[in-house]
Amino acid sequence: MTPVNPPHQTRTSPPQPVISALPEGVRVRLLHSVYGDPHAAAELVTLLTDRQSAGLDPLPTEPADLAPALLRDRRAQIRALPDDTRLLLLLAAADQYPVATQAFLRAVTAARLDTRPLETAEAAGVAHSGAGGVVFRDAWTRIAAYEAGSPADRRAVHRLLARVLHGDGEAARRSWHRGAGALGPSGRLAAELRGSADKARRTGQLALARALLERSATLSPDPSDRSRLLTRAAADAWNAGDGDRARRLAASGAADDVLGGLIALRAGTATEAFDALLTALTHRAGPAQPVRGNGSSGGREPADSATHLLARVTEAAIYTGDLRRCREAERAAWRLGIEPPGTLGGLAAAFEGRYEDARDLLRAAAGRCGPGGDPTLLVHAGIAALMLGDHSRAATATLRAATAAHAQGVTAVVAQAMEFRAYADFWTGRPQAGQAAATEALHQAYATGQDNGACHLQAALAMFAAITGDADVCRERAAAARSYALTRGLGLPAALAQWALAFLDLSDGRFAGAAARLRALAGFGPGHGHRAIRHLATPHYVEAAVRTDDTRIARGAHADYHRWATAVRSPDDLALSARCRALLAPGEEAVEHYRTALDLHARGTRDFERARTELLFGSALRRLRRRTEARDRLHSALAAFEHFGAPHCAARARAELRALGAPTAPTHAVNPTARLTAQQLLVARMVAEGATNREIAARLALSPRTIDHHLRGVFTRLGIRSRIDLVRLIAESEAS
């Protein structure tokens, strides 16, 4: 139920100075854990250890540890109410916390309770009656109403709620209340709760499954059984997106190399994750029980199955950038009698230069992207499609992965799917939409404790900022990504952030700097480069190398890129290879290569790169004094760059047109907000709603300094000077 604010409360600016000093991931999780309450956040931040403040240890998860003073005040307010009012509030709270069961009204009817005492709670501003039951003022009041009850009263209301939960699909919640109403350990109830947890998991209710397993562990008389139940609860908590609780439960339960490896993969050191997951695979699989890794399980496959373990091992290898580990994992899989997933075999073949084999394996993996499949395997289908240059299929696979993860309650996979969706948005010329989606995914990655995924998304946002010409944001995002990545052995985001900085240099005409950065991406290994980013970087490296008259290494890089493009037969990769050939060719010889490139672009999806090819072609035509065709190409490129919101590239097109003596009139849309980047528009709308810079920073997981920069950019692009002007302009644009 939605909490309401009592009439006497007024909106105040949250106390942010200490909170804003925390790392982004800790700040987002802290605010999430206290239900967004700024006063609870201010209290909690003073209670954190140094390791918790640094993000090294999980945050508290129990209300009494989150905001003890605030909760104490709320309990005192509840205890001041009459007994009959407190009983109704206790019943309502037990129905909502920590498991929502929606049985309050049935319980009131079954027990023949008088609900008029709730009027006293409403007069006190604590809660009020709603269509579905009781609506508490806020989450802390609901928790206080539950904790203010005596143990005997709490057990009684749980037993009452269990009695009225007998409808279809209510068995798991009935078990929950039966367990909460128990006097002490009970093997029978523990088994019932464990079975209900299994059913809840199969229907995608992972948070409920976690709560049931925790209660089962509390009631189990067997210490070893309790330990195993807590470990299973930790896995459900992690998949449901509750990273802090998962880490705490994992520490309390039995040692589990799979869960430890998974948490390390998403929030620790990628090389350690690889070793742990490969060890787990070796222990849990064998040649006597071969498993085919390319099938789709429809989301019903256990998370520790051979297929999923190999998928996680592959992800660890991709994150490190040390793709030699792919070959190691592939050999281990064949030794154990397990058929490796296509992404694993494809990456291993690509590492060894067997491009035709890599193509076939990656195509097989990319082809398994039908709706309703396993979210993890759909993510891998998207990765395979990206490697093949099939960005339409990559977008489909990652979107379906996010949809399937939502449906199955696997919240942790949603942000991961969006990590790789960002590449498809980038290549298909949707920087603003991609930036907005990546920003939302970044917040979700932080909220679910997946700091490694957040690092990858930071690098993706640096990539988008490079395209939209937001140099300060690009450098800030890239620096944050590289700083984190180099401490965790994450070669992929480190390389992507380096590419973003290189593209920014290239767009600004700093060709020597761009060439140096891009040349470094030819290496591989943790923190140095990445084979996948190598394909992203090579066409731009050739361009920068030509500008600096240092093409010896670039020619070798292009030869390898062309061999890959020829093998995978991606129109876009072949187009970029033709563009590289044009850049490396002298004079008139380049013209036909450019024409070939544009013909190939017409069959592909990388519209932004098509515009860059037109820009380079127009520049070459101008130097060859083919003025009419040069003007047409440059005008086409300029229109595309303005559509994409890429001002640096548009400025280069205008400079070339001015050199021709051709008009360069701007083609801005009538709506002035169309001049803003996606991030700037989001900030502008929040400001128009009355949010302060610090509030916006907390909501977007950015620093206040970055929000200040965005707001200055908004004022500059819109030609305004105050927030009042901005509010008026946003209102007018929304109405038009």
Image: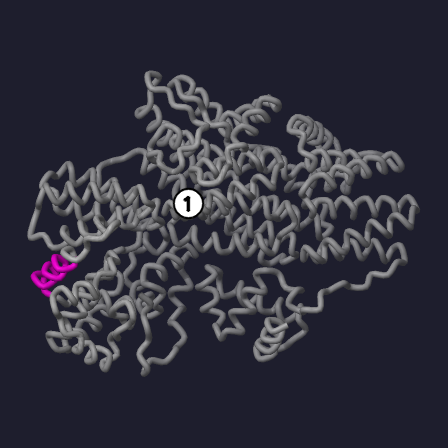
Of residues 415 and 72, the one drawn nearer to the viewer in this rendering? 415
In the shown orientation, is residue 7 left or right of residue 153? Answer: right
Residue 49 lies in quadrant: bottom left
Which is the main secondary structure of the residues drawn in magenta? helix
Of residues 431 and 22, the one drawn nearer to the viewer in this rendering? 431
In the shown orientation, is residue 385 left or right of residue 623? Answer: left
- Identified at 39% across, 48% down, the residue is 411
Q: Residue 250: in sight, yes or no?
A: no
Residue 232 lies in quadrant: top left
Q: Position of residue 78 (x, y in %)?
A: 18, 73
Mark 1, residues whose alpha carbon is within 10 Å: few (<14), some, or many (≥20)?
Answer: many
Task: Find numbered disc 1 in the image and state the secondary structure of the residue it sits on.
Answer: helix
- Quarter that holds the N terminus: bottom left
Of residues 717 and 444, the one drawn nearer to the viewer in this rendering? 444
Q: How is the image coloured?
A: one colour
Q: Position of residue 244 (x, y in %)?
A: 31, 50
**Vertical arrangement, residue 355 with respect to residue 249, above or below:** above
Highlighted magenta segment, given as a residue range: 150-161
- Identified at 62% across, 68% down, the residue is 714
Q: Residue 627: in sight, yes or no?
A: yes
- Identified at 91% across, 43% down, the residue is 624
Q: How many marks?
A: 1
Query: Circle 1 is placed at which residue position?
Result: 405
Q: Position of residue 702 (x, y in %)?
A: 48, 60
Of residues 7 and 88, the one drawn nearer to the viewer in this rendering? 88
The amino acid sitting under disc 1 is: Ala
**Vertical arrangement, residue 59 with respect to residue 695, above or below:** above
